[in-house]
């Protein structure tokens, strides 16, 4: 009778109706009965068009319910797609950097980035975190990074203040000192899509990228010579360059 259950399902699926009136036992029971082996299973006989079980009506109802459910889900999905399209096409999506984030934008961006990074190899830094490398890293940093990520003791510049997402200040607070160097290495090499963080692959050598990654990893414990290198004016301090700019004024503590 396994076959009968199947046959009935197929039959109603194609819109055929069982000939006999329902016996009242839903067909999954029938199914069980067959499984228990109390009725003989004759695949060929039952697979033929000869006999339609009476339980098909109830099965038909179940089938209709499933069809309705699937239709409902499809319509729901279409509705969601339509709403998303309308949200963007009607000009409601945030475009300006100062506009509020799309709901869950940051959360999803972070989940996506970390899920991706977790799958990568986690190499150990290819350069030692000694003063020579940190000074070389500082040279790279002040030329390529400080415009967005700031310098120690300097207030935010206009570019940093105007970006969305805001570039984290790597020499203020925790920065990325809590990330492994390989993680910053990957971000510097490859950039972060749709954030303004450029990828420096091909622009900086691997050694330079390691040096700057080790520098930002150790941003909270840099020595005076490294600080000096950072301060030695590749970029004019913002407070000097734009004294009128409120973003450039040192914050009152
Ligand atoms: C044009 C601006 C810009 C420049 C130049 C830039 N960055 Fe970024 N960077 C960003 C932005 C914006 C983010 C934030 C991305 C985000 O929130 O997803 C970022 C993120 C990062 C992060 C990850 C921070 C975190 O919290 O996980 C690191 C590390 C980083 N940058 C290092 C560098 C280094 C090193 C350089 C120079 C070689 C550099 N960046 C140059 C804009 C910039």
Image: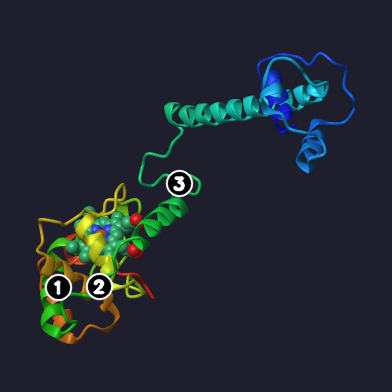
Horizontally, is 22 left or right of 162 in the view?
Answer: right
Q: Position of residue 83 (x, y in %)?
A: 53, 29
Q: Can residue 39 be seen at all in this image of the molecule?
A: yes
* CB within 8 Å, label 1 to label 2: yes
Horizontally, is 163 left or right of 198 in the view?
Answer: right
* CB within 8 Å, label 3 to label 2: no
Q: Which residue is mark 3?
A: 100
Horizontally, is 7 left or right of 112 in the view?
Answer: right
Q: Which residue is mark 2?
A: 216
**Distance CA(mark 3)–CA(mark 2):** 29 Å
Q: Tell which of 10 and 171 is nearer to you.
A: 10
Q: Which residue is mark 1?
A: 137
Residue 107 against residue 210 in the figure, above or below = above
Q: Position of residue 204 (x, y in %)?
A: 10, 61
The answer to which of marks 1 and 2 sits earlier in the sequence is 1
**Distance CA(mark 1)–CA(mark 3):** 35 Å
Q: Position of residue 54 (x, y in %)?
A: 83, 21
Q: Can residue 157 be seen at all in this image of the molecule?
A: no
The answer to which of marks 3 and 2 sits earlier in the sequence is 3
Q: Tell which of 70 and 55 is nearer to you.
A: 55
């Amino acid at each position: 009778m396994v076959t009968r259950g199947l046959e009935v399902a197929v039959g109603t699926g194609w819109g055929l109706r069982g000939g006999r009136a329902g016996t009242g036992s839903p067909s999954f029971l029938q199914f069980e009965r067959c499984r228990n082996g109390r009725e003989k299973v004759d695949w060929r006989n039952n697979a033929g068009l000869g006999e339609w079980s009476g339980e098909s009506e109830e099965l038909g109802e179940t089938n209709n319910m499933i069809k309705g459910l699937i239709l409902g889900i499809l319509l729901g999905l279409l509705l969601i797609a339509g709403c998303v399209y309308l949200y963007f096409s009607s000009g409601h999506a945030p475009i300006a950097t100062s506009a509020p984030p799309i709901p869950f934008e940051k959360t999803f961006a972070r989940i996506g980035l970390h899920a991706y990074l977790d799958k990568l190899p986690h190499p150990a830094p290819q350069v030692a975190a000694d003063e020579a490398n940190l000074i070389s890293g500082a040279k790279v940093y002040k030329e390529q990074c400080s415009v967005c990520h700031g310098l120690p003791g300097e207030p935010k510049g206009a570019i940093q203040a105007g970006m969305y997402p805001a570039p984290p200040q790597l020499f203020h607070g925790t920065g990325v000192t809590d990330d492994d160097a390989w993680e910053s290495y990957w971000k510097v090499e490859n950039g972060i899509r749709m954030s303004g963080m450029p990828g420096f692959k091909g622009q900086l050598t691997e050694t330079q990228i390691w040096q700057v990654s080790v520098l930002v990893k150790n941003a909270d414990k840099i020595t005076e010579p490294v600080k000096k290198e950072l301060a030695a004016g590749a970029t004019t301090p913002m407070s000097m360059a734009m004294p009128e700019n409120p973003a450039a004024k040192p914050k009152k503590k």
